[in-house]
Amino acid sequence: MISIHQLHKSYGKLPVLKGISLEFNAPGSVTAILGPNGSGKTTLMKSILGMVLPDQGDILVEGRSIKGQWAYRHQIDYLPQIARFPENLRVRELIAFLQDLRQGTTREAELIRMFGLEEQLDKRLNNLSGGTKQKVNLVLAFMYDSPVLILDEPTSGLDPIAMLRLKEFIQAERKRGKLILITTHIIHFVEEMADEIVFLLEGNIYFRGSQEELKARFGETSLERAIAAILGAGKTEMNGKASPSLFNSSTLQLLNS
């Protein structure tokens, strides 16, 4: 469904993505894209959305390059890490504004009930708490029922009930056959949600595989400890310029620059 080929992106002299190649072709799956700050996660997501233009490489959606295209975005629902809304608008006005911009059937009523926003609809956005703004962000991201979901830190600011509703929603969307990509720093959320992990380190794919494969690779019983190990090992290997061939296996993709 989404194919990424040798994607490079630098900001000035700072390389952020160094030849990333990935395939996301498994509908009904959740992939967690992990890595430390500055590893290229958000740049990768925004490149798929056409919000960042790569220096080299190509991205294909349903077999077609996205270069110079925009209509493919109607197949993708996107939740940004930080939502910036017109603060003077009321919640219902913001929802109506988005519906005017993008035609099509929406399901905002179901989502408003799910996240308990009924009493917030006539409040101005500048009067909402951070957690409530995130719930509005979730409604806007999910209301068009697209086949691909890209979620950048979806749990930010959510209370326990909203977090539970979000998990239930993602699980339901996965059962409906959607392709879901998530970036997050919340390891427990990854443990519950992710079928697959892609770990980026210094602009490279350091690991791709299941949670069990990652834990087995580092001899750990918890995902949190395995990720701590991958950070330590990855920095040591990259500083030592270890050969990528040392890490080839049938189940893991461990790559270095």
Image (spheres, rainbow, N blue to C red):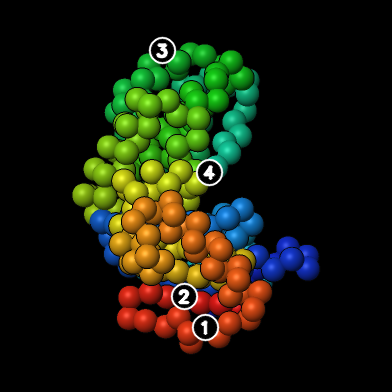
Of the residues under marks 3 and 1, which one precedes in the sequence?
3
* Residue position marked by numbered label 1 in the rendering: 244
The residue lying toward the viewer, choosing from 151 and 106, is 151
CA distance for labels 4 and 2: 28 Å
Q: Residues within 10 Å of mark 2 (few under 14, many from 20)?
A: some
Judge left or right: residue 128 versus residue 240.
left
Asked which secondary structure carries label 4, the reply is loop
Classify residue 210 by image quadrant: bottom left
Of discs 4 and 1, which sits in the foreground?
1
> Looking at numbered disc 3 in the image, what kind of residue is underneath it?
Glu
Q: Which mark is residue 119?
A: 3
**Residue 225 at x, y = what percent?**
44, 54
Judge left or right: residue 65 versus residue 250.
right
Q: Are marks 3 and 1 in contact (CB under 8 Å)?
A: no
**Residue 42 at x, y = what percent?**
57, 54
Asked which secondary structure carries label 2, the reply is loop
Of the residues under marks 3 and 2, which one precedes in the sequence?
3
The residue lying toward the viewer, choosing from 248 and 17, is 248
Q: Are marks 4 and 3 in contact (CB under 8 Å)?
A: no
Can you name the residue that lies furthest to the left here? 175
* Residue position marked by numbered label 4 in the rendering: 80
Q: Is residue 174 above or below residue 138?
A: below
Asked which secondary structure carries label 3, the reply is helix
CA distance for labels 3 and 2: 49 Å
* Residue position marked by numbered label 2 in the rendering: 254
